[in-house]
Amino acid sequence: MRRIAIIDYGMGNIRSVQKACEFLGHTASLVHEPSALAEADHVILPGVGAFADAIAQLRQSGFDKALRQYVCTGKPLLGICLGMQLFFESCTEGSQLHGIQTGLGFFPGLVTRFPSSLDVKIPHIGWNEVETRPSKLFAELPPSFYAYFVHSYQVSHTELPSAIGLTQHGHYFVSAVEQGNVLATQFHPEKSGTVGLKILENFLSLTPNDFTAKAKEKLGTSKTGGAPLC
């Protein structure tokens, strides 16, 4: 039986992610202690809210270090919405008060607010198209599909090698990433109907054997001088 851990760090209602896993026939536990990740086969980091508050909660609780240790085991990790943003190097949210916030650094890049010059509604809420690149996360899905989004901040660097999904809201932004055993979606698969359930099913079917050592070695590296994570 798969041991699925959903990190509960006080950022948003994560029960819907747990229910989606249960609908797929799996038992998923909401975990509050970093030590629980060592026993998990799959870990999910959801989240809704402010980047600064979320990264502070992860650091205060010790989940930041536990996540790095978990990733280095080669077991699958999935970030959802704010969870995906936390996987990046940094974010401008709250920078006027606190400066640019440093993330977990699994992926290179900066998370920024949708520019007001785009003349689109912010936050970006609702169904939108995801244009995909080949990925284990999207196995048996069409090359483009619709998923549900709720966010004001985004990764606009669409040329990232790790980008496996792109979506347009005024301009193209990164809606999904994959590098080694770390995967993430800006959209909410648990709120995206049958497509979203298939994405979660694909994630939960992954094992460490599905990831190459070469791909994992690139985690944490960046043009700004970041060292490999593991």
Image: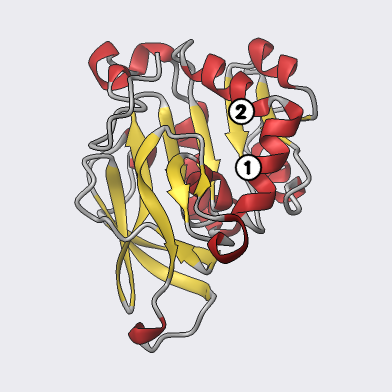
Q: CA distance from mark 1 to mark 2?
A: 8 Å
Q: Amino acid at mark 1?
A: Ile
Q: Amino acid at mark 2?
A: Asp
Sequence-first disc among 1 and 2: 1
Q: Which residue is found at the position 52% from the left and 29% from the top?
A: 204
Residue 20: image location, x then y, percent? 66, 44
Determine the secondary structure under disc 1. helix
Secondary structure found at label 2: helix
The numbered mark at residue 64 is: 2
Pointer 1 residue: 55
Image spot of residue 165 (x, y percent): 31, 52
Q: Is residue 161 left or right of residue 101?
A: left
Q: Residue at x 70, y 24 (%)?
A: 62
Task: Specify the quadrant that holds the C terminus.
Answer: top left
Q: Is residue 22 visible?
A: no
Q: Residues within 10 Å of mark 2 (few under 14, many from 20)?
A: some
| Relative height, residue 168 to residue 58 (above, below) | below
Quadrant hosting residue 67:
top right
Look at the numbered discs 1 and 2 and tell me whether their residues touch, using CB distance below 8 Å.
yes
Find residue 3 and report its horizontal and vertical position in percent: 66, 18
